[in-house]
Amino acid sequence: MNQGGGPDRRELFLSVLSGSPSKDIPIFLRDLTLGLDALNVDTDAVFGPVYDSKLSAACVLEMQKRIGHDAVVGCIHTYSMEAFGGITVYPAKGIPYQSDPPFAEIDRMEAYVPEDICDGLLEGMRESYRIVRRKAPHLAEIMNISGPVNTAGNLRGLEALMMDIILDPNLVSGLLRFSEGVMRSTIEYIGADCADAVFIAAASDNPDMLGLEEFMKMSLPGIRNVTNLCHEMGLPVIFHPHGLFSTEDRREVLRASLDAGVDGFQFAEDNTPSGILRETSGRCCVLGGLDAFNVLLLGPEERIIRSVGSLLDSLFGEDYIMTCSCSLNRGVPIKNVKTMADAARSYCGGRA
Amino acid sequence: MRVVMIAGFPGSGKTTLISRIATPDTGVIVNNPESASLIPDNIRKAYFPLRSPCARPRQFLHWIEKVHTEWYVDTLIAEPPGMCTETSSRILTQAIAFSNGRFEIGPLITVVRSNVLEKDITHDNSENLRVRQQICESDIVVISAAETINKDTASDIVRDLNPDVEILFLSSETEESIKKVHAAIFSERVLTRALNLF
C-alpha cells in the first residue's frame, strides 16, 4: 500500500474492484465534504450562489494530497434536490442538510421529470469531477449517487416515505420509479465522461428499516437495473446499504444483494468481516472498515491503529478495498484519517 | 446542559420509564410522535423526525443544540433517533466529539424487556446481536416487565456481556428502580462504557 501518488493507483483500484485481490490494499475514503476542512473553506463558499467547481476540486485534491488515498469522489457533495424545488441548507462550517424535501406535497412530483436533476448544481459538480480527472489522472474517480429508497426519502422526506410504505404502496412505486430515473440521469450525466466506477450510497436502503422482504422488493430491483445501465457504460458498481448483513439470518438478503450484479459491496457498522466474506468471497469485492463514528471520529491514535490491525487481520489477502463504515464529512479530524491510512499502509508493507 | 440517553428496542418500555421520571424542568425527546403523546403535557417535549441512519448522529446533535438554546432546561432525557436498534453509543460519542464540553453526557441507559432475556440470546440472529450490543455498550441496563423473571439468571446473562454494568429491575410492583434511574439521570455520573469499548 503505497502513498497514492504513482501512476498505478487507479489501475490497482479497478483491478481489485474487478476481482483480483492485492496485498497492496487500495484506500477509498468517500470523503464527501471533509475536503472542505482540508482547505479550511466555508461550506457555502462551494455551494452558493453558484457551485464553485474549482474550489470543490481543490478541496478534493488537497485532502488526497494529505492522506494519499487511491480513489476519490470528484466533488464536494450535496443532495442535489434543489433541481426539484427542495431546499438544502449549507451551514458555513457544517454539513449540508435538507430542510424541505421537494415532494413533501406529493402533487409537486407531477411538475418534474427525473432528467431535471441535470441542473446548474449538477453541472458544477460534473465540472469538479472533470477538473479532478485532469489534474489527477492516476487516481480512480468514483461517482457517488444515492440508492433507490435513499433517493425516494430525499425526495419525499423519509418519515413521509415510511408512512407511504404502509398506507399507499402505489405512491411508493411511483416514487421509486422516479428515483431510479434520477439515478439513471445522474449516472449518464456525470458517469459518461468522468467516472471510473459508480458508488451507490444507500443508508435508507436498509433491511433493518424496511424489513427483509420490503428491502428485496423496493431496493434491489432498482439496484439491479442501475447496475445493468452502469455495466453497459463500462462502469463497475459498488453498493453500500446500511443495516445488518453479516449474521446467519441475513445470509439470504446478502446473497440477493450480490445477485443484483454489483462488483463491490461495502458493509456498514456492526457487521463482521467474516460474516460478509462468507457470501462475497469469489463473487464480489468487499469494502468497509473502521466505524467512522465511534473509532475514527473520537480516536485516540492507539485505538485507530489497533482497529485497523484487527480489521486487516480479517481482510488482508481477500478481494478488499479499504474504506470506513460510512462516508466522511467535515468535522472528522483529518489527523485521525491519516493515522488510519498510515496504519493500513504499514500493515500491508509489513505483510506484502 | 446534561444529556442522558435512554435506549432500547421499540416496545421495551423506554417512554414509559421516561414518563415516570421526567419533571417539568426536564426536556424530553422521543423517537416518534406516538411516544411523545405518552409524555405528560406539562413537560417540554419533541420527537425526532425520521432520518437515514448515517444522518442520525448529526440529527441528535442538532436537537440537543436546539434544546440547549431554546428550552432553557438543565437536563435533557432523549431516546435515540430512528429505530432504536442501533447507533446509541455512536450517537453519544459523536455528541461528545462535537459539543466541545458544552454538554455533559450522562450514562447510557438501555431498557431491555424481560422476555428478550428468557430466550437464548447467544443464538446469532440479528435481534440477538443487537440486544447483545445494546447491553454491551450500556452503563445501566433496566430490565422491564420484570415481575416474573428470575433475577439471578437475568443478571448473569447481562453480566456475561458487560461485567461492570449496573442492572435494575423494573416492575409495576416497585418504585425502587425508578428512584435509582432518577438518581443516575440527575447525578454527575457520565458516559463511560461506550468510550471504553474499543
Image (cartoon, helix red, strand yellow):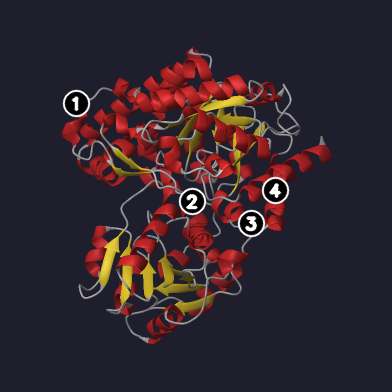
A308 or A130, nearer to the observer: A130
Name the subunit of mark 3.
Answer: A
- Distance of label 2 from label 3 (alpha carbons): 28 Å
Secondary element under disc 2, as helix, strand or loop, is helix
Nearer-N-terminus badge (4/1): 1
A73 or A272, nearer to the observer: A73
- Single out the mark in the foreground, 2 or 4: 4
- Distance of label 4 from label 1 (alpha carbons): 48 Å
A38 or A169, nearer to the observer: A38
- Residue at point 60% right, 32% down? A61
**Picture quadrant where residue A114 is located:** top left
Nearer-N-terminus badge (3/1): 1
Q: Which residue is mark 4?
A: A339
Nearer-N-terminus badge (3/4): 3
Secondary element under disc 3, as helix, strand or loop, is loop
Q: Which residue is mark 2?
A: B126
Amino acid on which the number 1 mark rests in the picture: Ala
- Distance of label 3 from label 1 (alpha carbons): 47 Å
Amino acid on which the number 3 mark rests in the picture: Gly
Question: On residue A299, which mark appears?
Answer: 3
Q: Are marks 2 and 1 on the same chain?
A: no
Q: Callout 3: 10 Å neighbours few (<14), some, many (20+)?
A: many
Name the subunit of mark 2.
Answer: B
Residue A338 rendering spot, x and y as whole percentages: 68, 45
Q: Which residue is mark 1?
A: A111
